[in-house]
Amino acid sequence: MEHPCHRCGSPVDDASPFCNECGAPQIRFSRPEVPVEDIVVSTQLDSVPAAVPQQPDPHLETNRRVSERERTVALRSALKGAAIAAVFCLFPVGFAIAMPLAGFLAVLFYRRRSWRADSSRRSGFKLGALAGLFAFMIFGLFVSVQVSIPASRDEFRKLMIDQLHTLQARSSDPEQRADIEYFTTPHGFPVGIALGAVVSCVFFAFFAGIGGAVAAALLRRRGPPG
């Protein structure tokens, strides 16, 4: 049997290895076709193991609890010292020592219940100033309750105006006397009360802070109370 040559198309016998016309070899080898498999890409993420929750540091947790307790002790100590000092403010003689007494007692009460070392003068001043603010608020509450009574209100207003007139008589500056006269008027009297309250608050905090700093220095030298 014959087959056409793949180069020139001439008939070639099946047993002949070459074409008689062009000499092209008739034995050809072809590479076997390898089936291409479909590659499937998975879009699903592999399950990631859940992160193990970290255990809190016991030292940090202890420090946090100690700090919270110390703040609570400081607030309670400041309130106790302020309450005692506010009672002293109700007496004319005790008003002068009430402000530094508030800071001193606040540091004293704090030292008795605190777990920490001796307080510095700066810490004592801060705690004393806080006690002074509390003492001012408690004393202001007492005064507000007393002034809410009509008879006491009129007496308080008369007392304040008399003091302003006394201060005005002692002043030789015309401008200063005019300013003092303004505070005796119905419009200026509330302004004077507000300014007096602000100044009193600053004095309470400052002198109570001084008392707290003194208490911190004295208690450090003498050691904690028994």
Image (tube, rainbow, N blue to C red):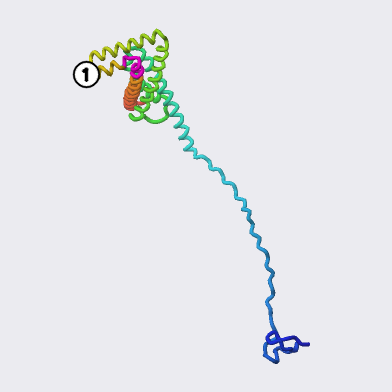
Is residue 218 among what the camera can see? no
Q: Is residue 133 left or right of residue 26?
A: left
In the picture as drawn, the residue positioned furthest to the left comes out as 172
The residue lying at 64 percent from left, 59 percent from top is 41
- The residue where tag 1 is placed is 173
Residue 102, placed above or below residue 33: above
In the picture as drawn, the residue positioned furthest to the right comes out as 1
x then y, percent, for residue 206: 32, 24
The residue lying at 46 percent from left, 34 percent from top is 64
The residue lying at 53 percent from left, 41 percent from top is 55
Query: In the figure, residue 200 lies in which quadrant?
Result: top left
* Residue 81 magenta: no
Q: Give the camera-side residue of 53 and 126.
A: 126
x then y, percent, for residue 112: 40, 24
Please tell me whether mark 1 sits on a helix, a strand or a loop. loop
Is residue 7 among what the camera can see? yes
Q: Give the camera-side residue of 161 and 59.
A: 161
Q: Give the camera-side residue of 19 and 96.
A: 19
Residue 129, placed above or below residue 5: above
Question: Magenta span: helix, strand or loop, mainly?
Answer: helix
Highlighted range, magenta = 183-193
Q: Where does the N terminus fall, quadrant-wise?
A: bottom right
x then y, percent, for residue 211: 33, 23
* Residue type (three-letter) at the residue carrying disc 1: Asp
Query: In the figure, residue 78 lies in which quadrant?
Result: top left
Q: Where does the C terminus fall, quadrant-wise?
A: top left
Query: In the figure, residue 128 lies in which quadrant?
Result: top left
Q: Is residue 205 left or right of residue 23?
A: left
x then y, percent, for residue 198: 35, 22
Rate crowding at label 1 as few (under 14), some (14 to 19) or many (20 or more) other CA atoms within 10 Å. few
